[in-house]
Image (cartoon, grey):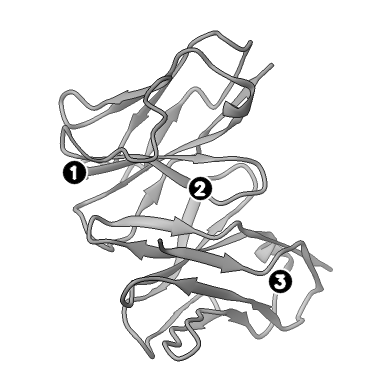
Amino acid sequence: EAGVAQSPRYKIIEKRQSVAFWCNPISGHATLYWYQQILGQGPKLLIQFQNNGVVDDSQLPKDRFSAERLKGVDSTLKIQPAKLEDSAVYLCASTFGQGYTEQYFGPGTRLTVT
Amino acid sequence: GNSVTQMEGPVTLSEEAFLTINCTYTATGYPSLFWYVQYPGEGLQLLLKATKADDKGSNKGFEATYRKETTSFHLEKGSVQVSDSAVYFCGGGSGNTGKLIFGQGTTLQVKP
């Protein structure tokens, strides 16, 4: 079965520019997560979707970050405007349902803000 | 709030050495616990898990036991290989939504 797909794999932008990341979860997985992984740290949850609804976005900096999953399948995470501290790897993960089932991670998008 | 603390790295071992990576958690209740591994250039992969106290998760020669009394979930392997070189993340469930809290990661380098 195909894994979680993410694009682009790498992105370099200047501060104050905008950027968008795309994620396509494993087919049939209703729950989708976006994590931010800063160098030397563990992944931190930004937002969780169940189908096309938001379950948890308490850690999402809503003044600059936004995410959507309009049709309950693929998802887009956007940053506008970017700051230097947004440099990180953005990971997408999915699971069949809520609860403590295995999360399947994509390869991530490495963002560098200069 | 819930938190996971794991030993700092990097950990450098010779091939066939014994590995221990410590992980302790602070949580309300007794969450499910996980170890994920991240090989260079790849996403995180589930290595093993335990869902209740005294459970032992195991996979690929790695083991970890959920110790309620010490709130720990230490990762062990009796004989590491060069191919085990990666970053290892300890994680715990938080709440009932499947949200995971991760430790900061421990880099393991195994030398031939």
Q: Amino acid at mark 1?
A: Ala
- Image depth: mark 3 or mark 2 in front: 2
Residue at the disc numbered 1:
A30
Which secondary structure lies at badge 3? loop
- Residue for point 37% across, 50% down: A104
Front residue of this view, candidates B31 and A89: B31
Chain letter belonging to callout 1:
A
Q: Say few, some or many: other residues with alpha carbon within 10 Å of mark 1 (under 14 / 14 to 19 / 20 or more).
A: some
Element marked by disc 2: loop
Q: Amino acid at mark 2?
A: Pro
- In the image, residue B74 lies at what x, y percent? 56, 79
**Residue at position x 64%, y 22% in the image:** A84
Q: Residue at x 50, y 79 (%)?
A: B73
For the C terminus of chain A, the quadrant is: top right
| Image height of B59 relative to B90, above or below | below
Q: Position of residue A12 (x, y in %)?
A: 63, 17
Counting residues from the start of the chain, the first of labels 2 and 1 encountered is 1
- Rounded to the nearest whole Å, what is the CA distance between mark 3 and mark 2? 26 Å
Alpha carbon separation for disc pair 1 and 3: 37 Å
Q: Which residue is mark 3?
A: B81
Q: Chain of mark 2?
A: A
- Please indicate whether residue A29 sits to the left or right of residue B74 in the image: left
Q: Which mark is residue A43?
A: 2
**Do the residues bearing badges 2 and 1 touch, measured as CB atoms within 8 Å?**
no
What is the x, y in percent for residue B90? 52, 65
Which label belongs to residue B68?
none
Q: Which picture quadrant has residue A57?
A: top left
Looking at the rendered structure, the kind of residue marked 3 is Gln
